[in-house]
Image (tube, rainbow, N blue to C red):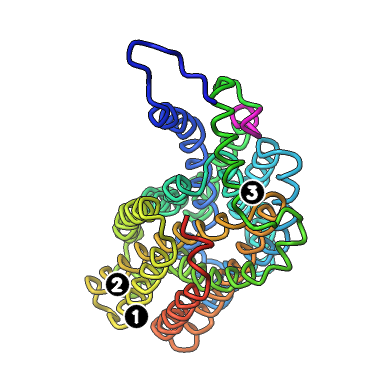
């Protein structure tokens, strides 16, 4: 048992446990949050670069959509192997490797001159970043049992909207103010400036992150034992999926991948097309567009943290994912209907961003609830890989349909319907498996 020093008023075990998890959270969660913020900024800043680079490089919307989406092909191909390697060599070394390589490739995006180099660098960026998100999600299962992981996952994934809250205005400022500096365009400076945080954090990871609970020096033996007991107790209640191959043989893993395909489609429509959708309503100034993009993501942070806290408290996971997905579908449909009405489009985009951010963070409580051991490493990566094919499909289809119809409306209706279907599939998963 956890060794709690006797005193006149000894600390209750529950309070002692809370103190241990507060210490763990303070140590690892803010750092992982800022790593993901930097990662996401490098992944989606192409959405702002698009405002200038398409005209300068003579790219069509289809070229942009394919280039933005091909990121996910590299990501999907290397994600499962990357997560398996991390499970073997440890989070510190592997997450640092991921961050440093993606930073260098993201910075190289400043020197794109043709569609071919655009495609190649986006593919390599996806390959470099493969394994980061599922790696961190797996890493969290080493520390937190399921009844605590929902809130922690929400805080980590809040880096997505936070990257847009700060990244949108920053990107708009760079496009406005640095254009022409030292002979470079604003979109080139955008890639150069925004790659620096990832590079610095990658090297810092080598010194800061610990691989496993047993390796840390900032917890005493009793605190380590408490965490290990909680994880062991939870692992004992999971299905017998300790073998790596079990993840690929489990139908529910493939079903979750299909569901996440629809969720990821919604995520990346917002991430890659939000600036363009706002511009289509008649807003032309890059800085104004950047400031407006922050509004939906402020709502997203509030919604995702409150909803995940509710999911942890009630130990209910399915409807906490389904309802935000339905809200996202409604938001996308409203945005499509709004046309050139900026106010109505912003309402739709806010609903969509808040809904999809919440659905994504709640979704990740599902696979972690019944996958354990090596199967968790492969299963979480497989689900994320299958889902991120939706990132490629959505960005390419939106680009292609925008060139075809000169509007994003038709594609927004399409993916709204897809989200409704995907969310409804969650009801086929037994509540006893995931409501923990």
Across and down, in percent, residue 145 comes to 52, 44
Location of residue 235 with respect to 221 vertically, above or below: below
**Circle 3 is placed at which residue position?**
102
The answer to whether the residues at label 2 and label 3 have Cβ atoms under 8 Å apart is: no
Give the mark nearer the N terminus: 2 vs 1: 1
Across and down, in percent, residue 241 comes to 70, 57
Given this view, does label 3 or label 1 mark the residue nearer the observer?
A: 1
**Circle 1 is placed at which residue position?**
333
Q: CA distance from mark 2 to mark 1?
A: 7 Å
Q: Is residue 290 one of those drawn in magenta?
A: no
Q: CA distance from mark 3 to mark 1?
A: 34 Å
**Circle 2 is placed at which residue position?**
348
Location of residue 187 with respect to 405 vertically, above or below: above
Q: Residues within 10 Å of mark 1 (few under 14, many from 20)?
A: many
Across and down, in percent, residue 116 comes to 69, 68
The quarter holding residue 96 reads top right
Where are the magenta residues, as a range?
A: 206-214
Location of residue 161 with respect to 142 vertically, above or below: below
Q: Which mark is residue 410?
A: none
Q: Is residue 352 left or right of residue 395?
A: left
Given this view, does label 2 or label 3 mark the residue nearer the observer?
A: 2
């Amino acid at each position: 048992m956890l060794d709690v020093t006797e005193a006149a008023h000894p600390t209750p075990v529950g309070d002692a446990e809370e103190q241990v998890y507060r210490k763990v959270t303070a140590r690892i969660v803010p750092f992982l949050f800022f790593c993901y913020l930097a990662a996401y900024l490098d992944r989606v800043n192409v959405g702002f670069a698009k405002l200038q680079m398409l005209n300068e490089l003579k790219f069509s919307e289809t070229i942009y959509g394919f280039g933005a989406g091909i990121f996910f092909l590299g990501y999907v191909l290397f994600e499962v192997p990357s997560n398996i390697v991390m499970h073997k060599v440890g989070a510190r070394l592997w997450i640092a490797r991921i961050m440093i390589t993606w930073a260098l490739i993201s910075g190289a995006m400043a020197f794109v001159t043709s569609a071919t180099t655009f495609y190649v660098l986006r593919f390599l960026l996806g390959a470099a970043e493969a394994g980061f998100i599922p790696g961190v999600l797996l890493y969290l299962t080493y520390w937190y049992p399921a009844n605590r992981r929902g809130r922690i996952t929400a805080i980590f994934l809040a880096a997505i909207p936070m990257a847009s809250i700060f990244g949108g205005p920053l990107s708009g400022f760079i496009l406005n103010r640095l254009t022409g500096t030292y002979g470079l365009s604003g979109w080139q400076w955008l890639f150069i400036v925004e790659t620096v945080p990832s590079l610095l954090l990658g090297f810092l990871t080598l010194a800061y992150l610990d691989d496993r609970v047993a390796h840390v020096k900032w917890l005493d033996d009793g605190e380590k034992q408490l965490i290990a007991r909680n994880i062991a107790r939870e692992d004992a209640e999971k299905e017998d999926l300790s073998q790596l191959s079990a993840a690929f043989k489990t139908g529910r893993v493939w079903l979750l991948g299909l569901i996440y395909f629809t969720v990821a489609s919604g995520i990346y429509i917002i991430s890659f097309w939000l600036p363009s959708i706002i511009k289509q309503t008649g807003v032309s100034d890059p800085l104004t567009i950047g400031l407006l993009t922050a509004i939906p993501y402020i709502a997203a942070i509030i919604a995702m943290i409150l909803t995940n806290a509710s999911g942890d408290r009630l130990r209910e996971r399915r409807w906490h994912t389904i309802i935000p997905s339905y809200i996202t579908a409604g938001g996308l449909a409203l945005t499509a209907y709004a046309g050139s009405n900026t106010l109505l489009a912003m309402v739709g985009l806010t609903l969509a961003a808040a809904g999809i951010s919440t659905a994504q963070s709640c979704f990740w409580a599902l696979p972690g609830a019944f996958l354990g051991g090596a199967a968790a490493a492969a299963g979480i990566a497989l689900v994320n890989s299958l889902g991120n094919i939706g990132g490629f499909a959505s960005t390419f289809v939106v680009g292609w349909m925008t060139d075809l119809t000169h509007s994003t409306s038709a594609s927004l209706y399409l993916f709204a319907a897809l989200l409704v279907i995907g969310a409804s599939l969650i009801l086929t998963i037994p509540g006893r498996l995931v409501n923990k």
